[in-house]
Amino acid sequence: MLGSVVVMNGIASAPAPGAVQRVLLLAPDDEARRALHLLIDRRGLQVVAATELETARKHLASAECDVVLVSPELAAQVCKEHNVPPVIAVVRTRDHATSLSLLEAGVDDILCDPLDDLALTLALRHVSTVQRRFAVVEAAPSLVGDGALMQKLKATIKVIAATRSTVLILGESGTGKELVARAIHEASPRRHRRFVAINCAAIPAPLLESELFGHVRGAFTDAVRDKPGLFEDADGGTLFLDEVGELPMGLQVKLLRALQESEIRRVGDTASIKVDVRLIAATLRDLDDDVGAGRFREDLYYRLNVLPVQVPALRERAEDIPQLARFFAGRHAARHRRDVALSEPAIEALARQPWPGNVRELENVIERALVLADGPAVDAEFLGTLMKVAPKASAEPDHELSVKKATRSLEADLIRRALGVTAGNRTNAAKLLEISHRALLYKMKEYGIS
Ligand SMILES: Nc1ncnc2c1ncn2[C@@H]1O[C@H](COP(=O)(O)OP(=O)(O)OP(=O)(O)O)[C@@H](O)[C@H]1O
Ligand SMILES: [Mg+2]
């Protein structure tokens, strides 16, 4: 059937060169998959169907399809895979938030089920113009900067990537620790498997264990079904534990066990599960201090600190600033569709700043400059006005969109204010906050409020 005539609305046309001929259909739901299968079959296209990512990977690896049609729950994951042809998500209902998150995840088109023939034809025609993506290798942001310190860092990454030892990435906020972790994963033999990242500070302590290790049904009130944790998600790949210094003591023991035994136990389970995960941890705290103060287990520290990697602060590698500045200017001009560039004096001015919030702060300032500029070039003077009002260190980590993180931060803030208003009287503060006295004490402990 390949290369056959495509009939669209009664008009016969030969498939254009590069037109879609082979479709990978990835949908766990049997009914939805069969319906799609039928529709695509009828068009004379070749279909391979998969119910799970694992099977889909084999087809992706052999580059045997021109497009992936995927149900929304697997769309983000498939976009992260290596060697992915264009991806079309097929949604049940079209709502703005879902569409937006699918597009952000990298899908090339979205179709609404039930599919009509015309919509499918147009979508297939559209994606046949999209380049095959080598998602993991090419689309991932690379480490910009060729100064001496960055060259050394890149050489270290290369060496480390070939091993499977645990890595501990150290560095100030915004220096690019997560990017370094990704770079290690992508240079490693595990690059075809998943890179799973979690920020230990962003997840409330009681949820963290189930997030990392999963749980079985009935393990706690909300555990209505078995759920694998991130260790299992990252099996064969890399797990990145950001802000590992925030890991509660109880979990430190469990993490150590997982590292030593290469097995984990889901919350509420009696059996263990073998996992093959390379762990990369990062911290901006001084874990040496934390060990001394009894806040971090010494045995875990040594287990994590097998290969320490120090990411330099931006002020220590100021020679990279012009290159970074041009890179971010290009990125944000494209992202905001603005034909604006940085002037040379502006770039020189950027290179003279101390950047306490490191690369993230530099990027934020440049993004704002490009959005707010009213001419084709951002000059040094205009930048100066922006830098004065730049948020201090712009040190919000990459989870500005995390509801969990925002809720925690708001909660901690309200508690501090209530305690301020009541001059530290906890009973009255709890009343103002409309929570129980016990809940207040618990939360104060959790957020380190004295
Ligand atoms: N060398 C670099 N080249 C390109 N972009 C970079 C570089 N270093 C950092 N960035 C960008 O700066 C931002 C911050 O980087 P990243 O999140 O990796 O920092 P971090 O050290 O993990 O920060 P935090 O400690 O706050 O979590 C990201 O948008 C990242 O893409
Ligand atoms: Mg980080």
Image: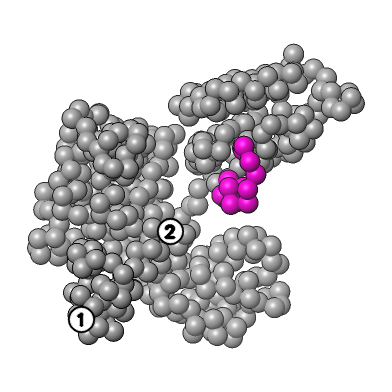
State the CA–CA distance, disc 1 to disc 2.
28 Å
The quarter of the displayed image where residue 314 is located: bottom left
1 or 2: tag closer to the N-terminus = 2
Q: Which residue is mark 1?
A: 424
Q: Is 59 above or below relative to 255?
A: above
- Magenta segment includes 98: yes
Observer able to see residue 86: no
Q: Callout 2: 10 Å neighbours few (<14), some, many (20+)? A: few
**Decide: marks 1, 2 in contact (CB < 8 A)?**
no
Q: Please name whichever residue, 250 or 321, is drawn nearer the observer in this view of the structure.
A: 250
Name the residue rendered at 25%, 45% in the picture.
Answer: 209
Indicate the position of residue 98 as horizontal and vertical percent values. 58, 47
Q: Which residues are magenta?
A: 91-102
Horizontal side of 382 relative to 317 (left or right) equals right
Q: Is residue 338 magenta?
A: no
Q: Residues within 10 Å of mark 1 (few under 14, many from 20)?
A: some
- Of residues 151 and 213, the one nearer the viewer is 213
Task: Report whether the residue tagged 1 is closer than 8 Å to ligand 1.
Answer: no
Q: Residue furthest right?
A: 11
* Label number found at residue 110: none
Say which residue label 2 marks. 403
Residue flagged by tag 2: what amino acid is it? Val
Quick check: 264 left or right of 320?
A: left
Where 436 falls versus 105 (above or below)? below
Quarter-wise, where is residue 272 in the image? top left
